[in-house]
Amino acid sequence: MAIIVNSTSTSLKEYRLLPGLTTEFSSKNNVNLQSHLCRSSNGYLTLNTPFVSASMQAVSDTRMAIALARLGGVSVIPVLPDEECQIAMVKKVKQYKAGFQTDLITFSPDAQIYQVEKSKYATGYSTYPVTDNGLFHGKLLGVITDKDFDAQTDQKVPVVRRMKTELVVAKEGTSLMQAKAIMIETGRGFLPIVSAEGTLQSVVFRKDLEHHIRFPNASEDQYGRLVVGAAVTTHPQHRNRISHLINGEVDFLVIDASDGYSEYQKETILYIKSLSDTPVIAGNVVTSEAFDYLVEAGADAIKVGMGIGSGCITQEEKATGRGQAAALMEVVNARDKLVDEGKQYIPIIADGGLSSPADICIALALGADTVMMGNYFARCTESPGEVHYRNGQAFKKYWMEGSLKARNLGRYFLGDSEDNQVDYFAEGISGWVPLKGSIFDLVPESCSKLKASLSSAGCSSISELHENSRLEHQSSVALGDSAVHSLIKDNDIV
Ligand code: IMP
């Protein structure tokens, strides 16, 4: 006979945080939401805002990824049917003007002025490095800007005759703040960073530094570029895509599977690890055995959640899944057990079923380090979904990855080939969510509420919340009392 597990699946919405002593140290202004996303080669990849936008076509495109990374979170670019398109999105985020740029259009000395002019019209850029071989990482010889030539008469003049060679450069290892000081002192708007041999490494534009002043929490790599992840599948025909994403300097990979407890997932982790030290997030899982299996295989973080996404029909169709609170409690216990045995801390990402700061707070208190959300971000102006107006209210399209609209076979077809499309059936639906506004308003507002919750619980950080918070399961009557009751809302009586 099958084993009947002696527990009841519970949802995040059934728990409440009990207040703890709020001290000056844990007052709202002193609460820090920094948290680990995953292990990395030099410790952990850490986010200042513990929010991850789901690897879904309705949620995470370039625009969302840039916006969320500026706010301190991170996006996972989904497995798009077109490999080139997914890789281009990752590159676009990495090349977003911020901090040190490592991939500017560059000219060789014998290029002609008309080529510079043409590039200016095509891209809008007016400043270009000139290197011996015309490649960005060549030996720096000069800089040409649109002010150095006459667009009418100089068309056929070689760049070498017009470029400026009296350059102010900085050495490799210069920090952004040092770069800013040099640019202010020398009155330059453009600072090339070169190696000891004179090879161009990166460049800094003064106007981009404003970005750092406005978004001090931004998720950035060691070069000041925004951080972005990409989803990959376990299917062998996607192996090339994995290496192309790694070459495109993606910061981490997420293995996309609705059920991550599989040998395919282990093989994919081992394959990625054999190529590079790019962090790998595996999942999704809802049990301790699955967590242990993927950690043993080398996963750098584990995603938890099955059958609880807002538009998910997996539980109805396949009867597999688990309440997010029950899943988190079991998996967090397994993680803590490993730590007690002296093993490394593995970050956990709560994925699915989180749509409000209250849900996020409970997931974090139960031991998640970050939260992955689809529905929450789909409501933002910055999400890719189209806008639709009905009865004076604006809605955005939100479709699940397993819906007929997305047909993400890589994710919703467990096996080693996605050619057999006959076996495919939908595990998600497509629908509408209310348009809430810009992510630049929504995320700070949610963070403010989260900080207030942590402060009430007497905690000044997410790690303190993990260790010290007390949660209580609510009866359905208590839950009824926790919402508006015995009162008719203004709008309902008009
Ligand atoms: P939401 O934030 O509650 O909308 O959940 C988003 C999460 O649902 C994603 O990060 C996925 O883990 C999961 N998901 C996405 N598409 C599907 C689907 O078609 N079926 C089931 N789960 C899905």
Image (tube, rainbow, N blue to C red):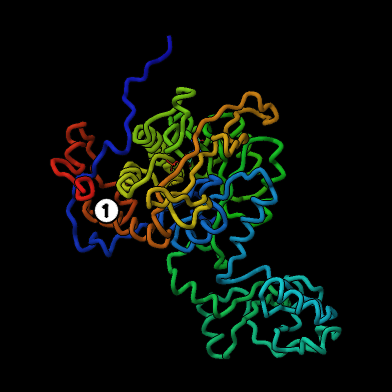
**Front-most of 139 and 161?**
161
- Residue at 57% of width from left, 32% of height from top? 412
Relative to 490, 119 lies left or right: right
Location of residue 280 in the rendering, given as x and y in whole percent from the top left corner: 56, 45
Location of residue 292 in the rendering, given as x and y in whole percent from the top left corner: 48, 33
User: What is the number of callouts on the image?
Assistant: 1
Q: Is 151 drawn above or below residue 314 in the view shown?
A: below
- Residue at 81% of width from left, 85% of height from top? 160
**Front-most of 390 and 158?**
390
Distance from mark 1 CB to nearest ligand 1 atom below 8 Å: no
**Front-most of 418 and 192?**
418
Q: Is 101 drawn above or below residue 332 in the view shown?
A: below
Location of residue 445 in the rendering, given as x and y in whole percent from the top left corner: 33, 59
Location of residue 392 in the rendering, given as x and y in whole percent from the top left corner: 38, 52
Relative to 141, 455 lies left or right: left
Can see residue 403? Answer: yes
Q: Which residue is mark 1?
A: 454
- Per the image, label 1 sits on a secondary structure element best described as helix
Question: Which residue type carries mark 1?
Answer: Leu
Q: Furthest residue to the top? A: 1
